[in-house]
Image (cartoon, rainbow, N blue to C red):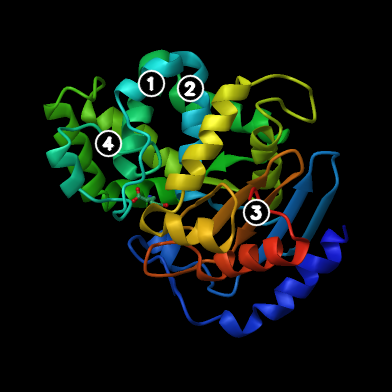
Amino acid sequence: MDYQGIIEEIAVLVEPEFGKGKVADYIPALAKVPADKFGIAVQTMDGACFQVGDAEEPFSIQSIAKVFALAQAYPVYGEALWKRVGMEPSGNPFNSLVQLEYEKGIPRNPFINAGALVITDMLIEHFPKPKTQMLDFIRELSGSDDVYYDYEVARSEREFGFTNAALVNFMKSHYNIKAPVEQVLDVYFHQCAIAMSCRKLASAFLVLANHGVLPHSGKRMLTQSQAKRINAVMLTCGFYDEAGEFAFCVGLPGKSGVGGGIVAVIPNELAIAVWSPELNEHGNSQIGIKVLERFTTMTGKSIF
Ligand code: GLN
C-alpha cells in the first residue's frame, strides 16, 4: 500500500476545507495556534513511518491524553476501574454537567472530562508522582523522550478551568473523588497540556493496534482484553456527541482533542495521527475527520 502517496493526495484534497472551522479559544495559549497548521503521520507495525506537513511539530494533545490516562490506570485497577466510571457513549458535549447529576457522580465514560477526572484521581491514589509517571509512561509508549508538559497551556487551563472544577467538586460530593480537588485538577490540567507531535502520537498508539504489546520493544503494557476494551471505548466514546458520525464516516477507533489532534488505530496494521487546529461545533478537528474519512476510503481499510 502506497501510504505516502495516499496521504500526500489527501493533503491536497482537503485544502479547500481550511477556514471552515474555529481554533479553540477558551484559553489564550490555544487561541494563538495558527489555524493553518497541518500534519499527518502514519506509523505502521513494522516500523515504517509516512508523513506530510507539520507531522514532527509538537502540539497540545488535550483530550487525547485521556486514552493514555486510561491505559495507565487500567492495568493497576483491572475491572474494578469500571465501578467508578461507565463505558457508555454520553451523547453530550465533553464538559457536560447535566448527565453527571442524574447519574449521581458516576461519569458515563473515561473520555468525557468527568470520566477523565475520575481516572486522574485513581492515578493519584496509586502513583506517588503522577505527573512525572504519566510522562514516563507516554515516553515508553512512544519510544521517545520528546513528550513534555507545555506549562503555559497548563497554567491557562487552571486559570479558566471553572467547569472542570465544578465537575470535580460535584463528583467529590458523591464520594467518587478521593484526592483533594486542587490536586486532581492540577494533574488533569497537566495531562491536557501534554505536547507531542503527530509522529510520536502515532507511535504511542501502536500499542492499541498490537493488542497491548509495544511493537518496538515487545513489552506487554496491557492485556489483550484491556487493549480491545480501550479500542471499543474509543470507537463508541472517542468523539463525544460526534462518536456515531465518526464511526459512520471513518470506521476506526480514535480519539480527538481540542488542540486539533486526532489519532486512530487500524488493528494489526497501523496508527495514524492528524493535526489541524480548526474545530467543528463538537470540538473535534474539522479537517482531521475529513482526512481520516478519505484515508479509510482510499485504502479500503477500516474495522468493518
Ligand atoms: N482542556 C480541555 C478541557 O478540559 C480538554 C477538552 C478536549 O480536548 N476535548 O476542557
Q: Earlier in the sequence, mark 2 or mark 3?
A: 2
Separation (CA) of disc 4 from disc 3: 27 Å
Q: Earlier in the sequence, mark 4 or mark 3?
A: 4
Q: Residues within 10 Å of mark 3 (few under 14, many from 20)?
A: many
Residue at the outermost bottom position: 16
Image point (48%, 22%), residue name: 74
Q: Position of residue 251 (x, y in %)?
A: 59, 55
> Tags 2 and 3 in contact by the CB under 8 Å rule?
no
Q: Earlier in the sequence, mark 1 or mark 2?
A: 2
Secondary structure, mark 1, is helix
List the residue tagged with mark 4.
Answer: 107
> Tags 2 and 4 in contact by the CB under 8 Å rule?
no
Q: Earlier in the sequence, mark 1 or mark 3?
A: 1
Q: Position of residue 36 (x, y in %)?
A: 59, 75
List the residue tagged with mark 1.
Answer: 81
Q: Position of residue 93 (x, y in %)?
A: 30, 55
- Which amino acid is tagged 4? Pro
Mark 1 vs mark 3, foreground winner is 1
> Tags 1 and 4 in contact by the CB under 8 Å rule?
no
Left or right of 281? Residue 205 is right
Secondary structure, mark 4, is loop
Separation (CA) of disc 2 from disc 3: 23 Å
List the residue tagged with mark 2.
Answer: 74
